[in-house]
């Protein structure tokens, strides 16, 4: 059986070095795969939500920075910086601290980047009240007492908006919905039959 670490020249790696190296490899490879999926199309969205659909306690999505890409960036930079520090003779504890700081910094940067992308997407002369009556699908699961995201088309543009279930029921990703109200920047939605959506599109 081929020893991958020996093949890559890391046969003598052990302990904390191994942790850093595995973190960098796993995070880096998955980050590259994610990036390629983004270039190909929107498949990454469904994959990310499927892998990381974790309930952080419905706090109005206050943990949005813990996105799929942010987590990958954290592990990648934690591993790279930690491995570099420990191989430069830095104490194990300082190397671990340096890796954590680098990982946290990269997670923050990625979250700010996507926050900026979201603002660009929603900027312009878009009146959210025009979304009432529009139909679309649930993008990020809406829990019975929490906030999720939906994709709806209004003003001739596909929009991704935060949403709550008006009926107080959980709406899973892919559920067809209709916007029935607006509260601030959050849409109030209800589930509808898929046939209704097709009839409206026709």
Image: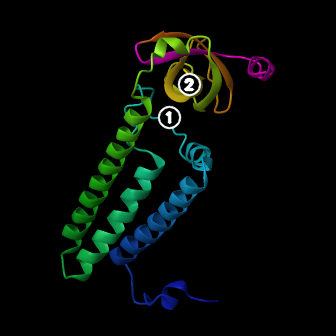
Residue 99 quadrant: bottom left
Residue at left offset 58%, top offset 24%: 156
* Residue 143, numbered label: 2
Q: CA distance from mark 2 to mark 1?
A: 9 Å
Indicate the position of residue 12 as horizontal and vertical percent values.
40, 89
Please say if 90 is above or below 28: below
- Do the residues bearing badges 2 and 1 touch, measured as CB atoms within 8 Å? yes
Residue at left offset 44%, top offset 57%: 72
Please say if 36 is above or below 64: below
Q: Is residue 98 magenta?
A: no
Indicate the position of residue 84 as horizontal and vertical percent values.
27, 76
Q: What element does badge 2 sit on?
A: loop
Q: What element does badge 1 sit on?
A: loop
Please tell me how crowded label 1 is: few (under 14), some (14-19), or many (20+) other residues with Cα within 10 Å.
few
Q: Which residues are magenta?
A: 184-202
Q: Is residue 185 magenta?
A: yes
Please tell me how crowded label 2 is: few (under 14), some (14-19), or many (20+) other residues with Cα within 10 Å.
some
Taking depth in this image into account, of 155 and 184 the one nearest to the observer is 155
Circle 1 residue? 55
């Amino acid at each position: 059986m081929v020893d991958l670490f020996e093949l890559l020249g890391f046969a003598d790696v052990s302990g904390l070095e191994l942790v850093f190296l595995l973190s960098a490899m796993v995070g880096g490879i998955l980050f590259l795969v994610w990036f390629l999926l983004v270039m190909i199309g929107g498949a990454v969205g469904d994959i990310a939500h499927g892998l990381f659909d974790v309930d952080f306690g419905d706090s109005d999505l206050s943990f949005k920075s813990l996105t799929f890409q942010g987590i990958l960036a954290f592990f990648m930079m934690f591993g790279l910086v930690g491995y570099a520090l420990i191989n430069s003779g830095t104490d194990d504890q300082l190397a671990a601290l340096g890796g954590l700081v680098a990982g946290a910094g990269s997670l923050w940067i990625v979250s700010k980047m996507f926050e900026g992308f979201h603002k660009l997407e929603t900027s312009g002369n878009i009146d959210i009240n025009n979304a009432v009556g529009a139909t679309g699908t649930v993008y990020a699961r809406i829990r019975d007492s929490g906030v999720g995201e939906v994709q709806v088309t209004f003003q001739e543009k596909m929009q991704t908006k935060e949403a709550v279930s008006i009926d107080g029921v959980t709406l899973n990703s892919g559920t067809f919905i209709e916007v029935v109200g607006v509260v601030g920047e959050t849409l109030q939605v209800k589930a509808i039959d898929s046939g209704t959506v097709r009839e409206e599109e026709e």
